[in-house]
Image (cartoon, helix red, strand yellow):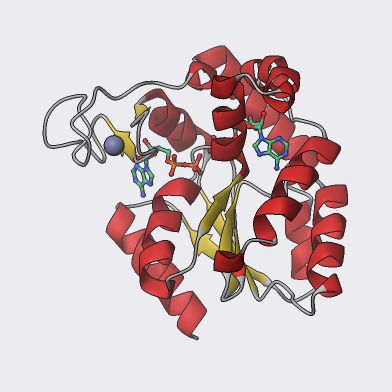
């Protein structure tokens, strides 16, 4: 199963990707996670991406495509993958189609999570994640068993720098301008599966499962 999880920042892509990983036994490819690792390790690529990520802008297509192409070439992607946070621009989507075509593959479904802006702000302001395993939480909607501690690793959860309110506003504007047009792009290819992303996490998960089965 070759999937794209699509939606604005905070829509629940990372949260729902974790379920898809388990049910379809496919790896999650999160460009945001990969870029954050590069920034933390201060690799040449990370140094280039750092400032733009802090401001909530988009890292260049060239950098992002380099990471994705390398990742898709790895063995564990042969039986499928779920792309989370990629593509985010039309040139990225065109390049993805080309990369896949070269090895006889293609995208089967684009799952688009629909959430309104007010809810997004609530979700992002309470988002926390584990610095060790990357698992995501929310202080009230998806709380860890112990306050601010990862259920899996037992280490203190962190808040992302770019989840501050002003940066969130930038990210939403960038989404509307550069990323939202991809919905039409994939709709015209009959790949778009629109899923209401409001409501409890488990319900959204059921809607996705039903859409992929149907
Ligand atoms: P969210 O989960 O809130 O949507 P991500 O973790 O996907 O955020 O992305 C965090 C940041 O990483 C983005 O604001 C952007 O700067 C950068 N980034 C991630 N994916 C891409 C991409 N496909 N193209 C350009 N920049 C990206
Ligand atoms: P994205 O990857 O699209 O940026 P996340 O999966 O990180 O979004 O979710 C953003 C925040 O909202 C996280 O704190 C997560 O726990 C929470 N969240 C995700 N789905 C839901 C939901 N259906 N209801 C309430 N909170 C949610
Ligand atoms: Zn953890």
The image position of residue 75, as x and y in percent, is: 60, 67
The image position of residue 72, as x and y in percent, is: 67, 60
The image position of residue 117, as x and y in percent, is: 53, 35
Q: Residue at x 39, y 38 (%)?
A: 134
Q: Residue at x 31, y 62 (%)?
A: 203
Judge from the rendering whether residue 209 lies leftward or rightward of residue 201; answer left or right. right
199 relative to 165, above or below: below
101 relative to 40, above or below: below
Judge from the rendering whether residue 102 lies leftward or rightward of residue 173; answer left or right. right
2 relative to 90, above or below: below
Q: How many marks?
A: 0
Front one among 98 and 128? 98
Front one among 155 and 206? 155
> Residue 179 falls in which quadrant of the image?
top right
Q: Residue at x 42, y 71 (%)?
A: 25
Can you tell me which quadrant of the image ligand 2 is in?
A: top left
Judged from this view, the residue extending furthest toward the left is 146
Q: Residue at x 35, y 39 (%)?
A: 133
156 relative to 205, above or below: above
Front one among 69 and 166? 69
> Residue 124 falls in which quadrant of the image?
top left
Front one among 45 and 184? 45
């Amino acid at each position: 199963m070759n999937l794209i999880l699509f939606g604005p920042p905070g829509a629940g892509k990372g949260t729902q990707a974790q379920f898809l990983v388990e049910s379809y036994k496919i790896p999650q490819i999160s460009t945001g996670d990969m870029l954050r690792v590069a920034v933390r390790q201060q690799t040449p690529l990370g140094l280039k991406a750092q400032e733009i990520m802090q401001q909530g802008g988009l890292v260049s297509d060239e950098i992002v495509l380099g990471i994705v192409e390398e990742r898709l070439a790895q063995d564990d992607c042969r039986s499928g993958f779920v792309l989370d946070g990629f593509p985010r621009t039309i040139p990225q989507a065109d390049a993805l189609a080309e990369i896949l075509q070269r090895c006889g593959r293609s995208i089967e479904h684009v799952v688009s999570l629909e959430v309104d802006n007010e809810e997004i702000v609530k979700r992002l302001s309470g988002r926390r994640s584990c610095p060790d395993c990357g698992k995501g939480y929310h202080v009230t909607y998806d709380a860890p068993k112990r306050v601010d501690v990862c259920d899996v690793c037992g280490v203190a959860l962190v808040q992302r720098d770019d989840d501050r309110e002003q940066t969130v506003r930038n990210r939403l504007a960038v989404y509307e301008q550069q990323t939202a047009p991809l919905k039409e792009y994939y709709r015209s290819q009959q790949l778009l599966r629109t899923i209401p992303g409001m409501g409890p996490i488990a319900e959204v998960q059921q809607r996705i499962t039903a859409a992929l089965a149907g």
